[in-house]
Image: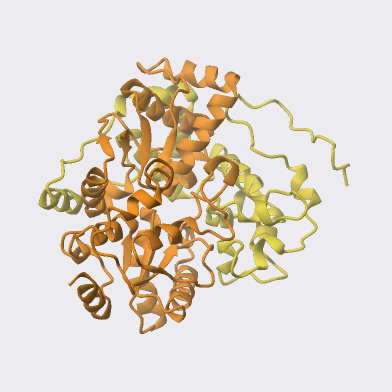
């Protein structure tokens, strides 16, 4: 095991703003005490998924997987930070899981709902489709009708950051 | 006091009656709301922000820049929007290199992030800008005898050094807000566990049902008449999610959920009809009769 204050090798530096929020070394110092998951009233909600137990916790499932960025369970994390706050060893599993999600998205392996939501946001400005039911409810309540929001600015931002190119990779795979 | 109203997506698209009540109630207690047509999704924390951080940071920075141009702090109605906008605002104020990078991206639009305003959840505005003592003076019909299970939700609690709202393991602020209306905060177990929406969304629906069912049972054991929330995602999970969970688990239980601003409205003289309770999935005759007696 590496010394606790040793910085891990990260390879080529990622672009500013897209760095992993944490370091893989943190996963290696986790000694599987389970505190982040097994305090039923206070800890990780994903631990309540029926296939996890005190000896195979949600966090260990994410950190200990053979292909962590390909483990579909990473998408169950809600980023509530409970694991980070409860960990007695400063592992911060939430940041590791978030980095795994970002890696998965980068590699074209993100959950389809995630890809769909990102496309929805950058093309309409909303995380949800504008439905007829929503329009009728708003009209009945005397609220202004919703229209697409700032889609031209969102397109320019997404092109500049490279998001459009990443999403195009998903479209190629879909076809 | 004046704020730029950041509605987000969930409320205007899926829970427009909450928007209606928020505009009305906040206006009545002296919070002037200014709309900004160009606001977009915050963007959503779990689906977007952590998966492509640079784009998400730029989109959030653009939203903040629009409010800066209007000269107002932002008021939000959603824990998730607050979580993203507050974190990005703090990060960009602290990290000049990242701010320059983000402004380079924003140069493609007509906006620039300057770092001149704050982002506040409406619950923070009620506590910090108005104050619960002054809020209590707006109460015309104290909700005496109504037991309310306050579910604060995750994203306004953590990370606590950024969100600066409440203790993630012993949250009391929402309970104090409930007490300011004359109602009784219920003390229930599993209070700080997430409502479970990522379990619902990402393939663990039955586990989500069990989690929601367990939280509802804990609230019921504590004698709650209803639930109160300050986040639309939590609202949805305890309304539509409750309907699905009780059906799936065959639980004989109905605990209506009210967005806090609906509860505030009731205490200010609104009727259940005025706060559009009829648009909720979970309704309870016992709750309606009790509220009727309190408001009579």
Residue A125 visible here: no
Q: Is B193 situated above or below B219?
A: above
Q: Position of residue B219 (x, y in %)?
A: 44, 74
Residue at 35 percent across and 16 percent down: it is B110
Q: Among the chains, which one is yellow? A: A
Residue at 57% over, 27% down: A17
| Relative depth, front residue between A4 and A151 | A4
Residue B181 can be seen in this image: yes
* Residue at 34% from the left image edge and 65% from the top image edge: B182
Chain B's colour is orange
User: Left or right of B235: which side holds A26?
Assistant: right
A108 with respect to B296 (left or right): right
Q: Point out residue A105 in the picture as x, y percentages from the top left corner.
A: 53, 41
Classify residue B161 by image quadrant: top right
Which quadrant of the figure contains the N terminus of chain B? top left
Question: In which quadrant of the rendered view does residue A159 lie?
Answer: top left
Residue B78 position in % (x across, y down): 38, 48
Query: In the figure, B184 relative to A25: above or below?
Result: below
For this rendering, which residue is in front, B81 or B296?
B296
- Number of marks in the rendered image: 0
- Is A75 situated left or right of B276 in this image? right
Q: Residue at x 52, y 43 (%)?
A: B163
In the rendered image, the vertical position of residue A71 relative to residue A8, given as above or below: below
**Percent coordinates x, y for residue A10 in the rendering:** 74, 32
């Amino acid at each position: 095991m590496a010394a606790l204050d040793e910085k891990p090798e990260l390879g080529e530096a990622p672009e500013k703003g897209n760095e992993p929020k944490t370091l893989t070394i943190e996963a290696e110092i986790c000694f599987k005490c389970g505190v982040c998951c097994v305090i039923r009233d206070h800890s990780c909600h994903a631990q309540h998924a029926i296939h996890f137990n005190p000896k195979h916790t949600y966090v260990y499932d994410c950190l200990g997987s053979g292909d962590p960025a390909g483990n579909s369970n990473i998408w169950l994390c809600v980023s509530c930070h409970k694991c980070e706050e409860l960990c007695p060893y400063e592992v911060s599993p939430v940041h590791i899981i978030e980095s795994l999600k970002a890696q998965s998205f980068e590699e074209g392996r993100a959950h389809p709902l995630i890809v769909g939501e990102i496309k929805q946001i950058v093309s309409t400005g909303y995380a949800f489709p504008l439905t007829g039911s929503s329009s009728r409810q708003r009209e009945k309540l005397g609220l202004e009708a919703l229209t697409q929001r700032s889609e031209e600015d969102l397109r320019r931002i997404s092109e500049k950051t490279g998001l459009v190119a990443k999403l195009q990779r998903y479209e190629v795979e879909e076809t | 006091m004046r704020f730029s109203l950041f509605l987000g997506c969930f409320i205007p698209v899926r829970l427009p009656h909450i928007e209606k009540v928020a505009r009305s109630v906040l206006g009545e207690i002296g919070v002037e709301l200014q709309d900004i047509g160009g606001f977009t999704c915050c963007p959503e924390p779990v689906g977007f922000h952590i998966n492509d951080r640079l784009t998400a940071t730029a989109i959030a920075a653009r939203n903040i820049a629009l409010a800066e141009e209007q000269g107002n702090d932002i008021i939000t109605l959603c824990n998730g929007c607050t979580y993203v906008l507050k974190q990005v605002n703090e990060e960009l104020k602290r990290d000049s290199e990242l701010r320059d990078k983000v402004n380079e991206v924003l140069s493609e639009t007509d906006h620039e992030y300057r770092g001149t305003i704050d982002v506040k959840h409406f619950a923070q505005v009620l506590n910090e800008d108005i104050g619960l003592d002054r809020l209590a003076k707006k109460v015309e019909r104290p909700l005496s005898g109504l037991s309310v299970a306050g579910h604060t939700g995750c994203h306004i609690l953590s990370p606590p050094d950024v969100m600066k709202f409440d203790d993630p393991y012993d949250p009391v602020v929402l309970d104090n807000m409930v007490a300011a209306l004359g109602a009784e905060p219920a003390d229930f177990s599993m209070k700080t566990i997430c409502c479970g929406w990522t379990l619902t969304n990402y393939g663990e629906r039955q586990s989500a049902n069990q989690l929601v069912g367990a939280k509802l049972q804990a609230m019921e054991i504590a004698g709650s008449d209803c639930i109160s929330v300050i986040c639309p995602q939590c609202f949805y999970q305890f309304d539509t999610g409750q309907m699905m969970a009780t059906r799936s688990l065959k639980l004989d239980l109905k605990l209506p959920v009210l967005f806090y601003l609906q509860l505030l409205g009731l205490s200010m003289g609104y009727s259940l009809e005025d706060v559009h309770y009829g648009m909720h999935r979970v309704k309870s005759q016992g709750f309606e009769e009790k509220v009727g007696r309190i408001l009579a």
